[in-house]
Image: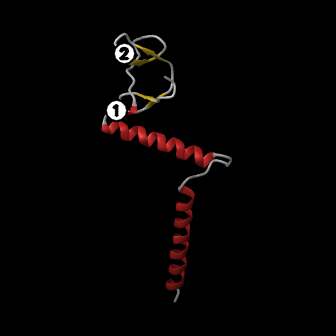
């Protein structure tokens, strides 16, 4: 079933080959190996894993919306640095004024 998303037990989204075990469980990899892990649907995850899955989906969606048709943005660091710079400039100007009066 390709339309349903599958997750690992910790809530990370799995996008890769899968195989079905004889008991009906879905596992990663095309055939069963030592590294195969059981995959879950969102409704079968624990509360903690659901939160992680929601956050990762939200972050991916938010990131793709921000980057569509634009150059990569700096996020909140540039506005924060500008505010810090203006704050320091104001403090320095007050210091210079009051130190020589």
Left or right: where 47 falls relative to 58: left
Q: Residue at x 64, y 46 (%)?
A: 68
Residue carrying label 2? 24
Q: Is residue 2 left or right of residue 45?
A: right
Q: Position of residue 93 (x, y in %)?
A: 55, 78
Q: Image point 35% across, 36% down: which residue? A: 49
Which quadrant of the figure has residue 32?
top left
Q: Which mark is residue 45?
A: 1
2 or 37: nearer the viewer: 2
Q: Nearer the viewer, mark 2 or mark 1?
A: 2
Q: CA distance from mark 2 to mark 1?
A: 17 Å
Q: Residue at x 58, y 43 (%)?
A: 64
Front residue (pair 23, 75): 23
* Colour convention: secondary structure
Neighbours of disc 1 within 10 Å: few (<14), some (14-19), many (20+): some
On the image, which quarter does residue 85 sit in? bottom right
């Amino acid at each position: 079933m390709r339309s349903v998303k599958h997750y690992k037990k910790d809530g990370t989204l799995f996008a890769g080959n899968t195989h079905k075990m004889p008991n009906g469980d879905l596992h990663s990899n095309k055939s069963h190996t030592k590294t195969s892990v059981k995959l879950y649907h969102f409704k079968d995850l624990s509360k903690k894993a659901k939160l992680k899955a929601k956050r990762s989906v939200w972050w991916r969606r938010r990131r793709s919306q921000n980057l569509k048709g634009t150059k990569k943005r700096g996020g909140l660091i540039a506005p924060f640095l500008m505010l810090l710079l203006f704050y320091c400039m104001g403090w320095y100007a007050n210091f210079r004024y009051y130190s020589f009066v």
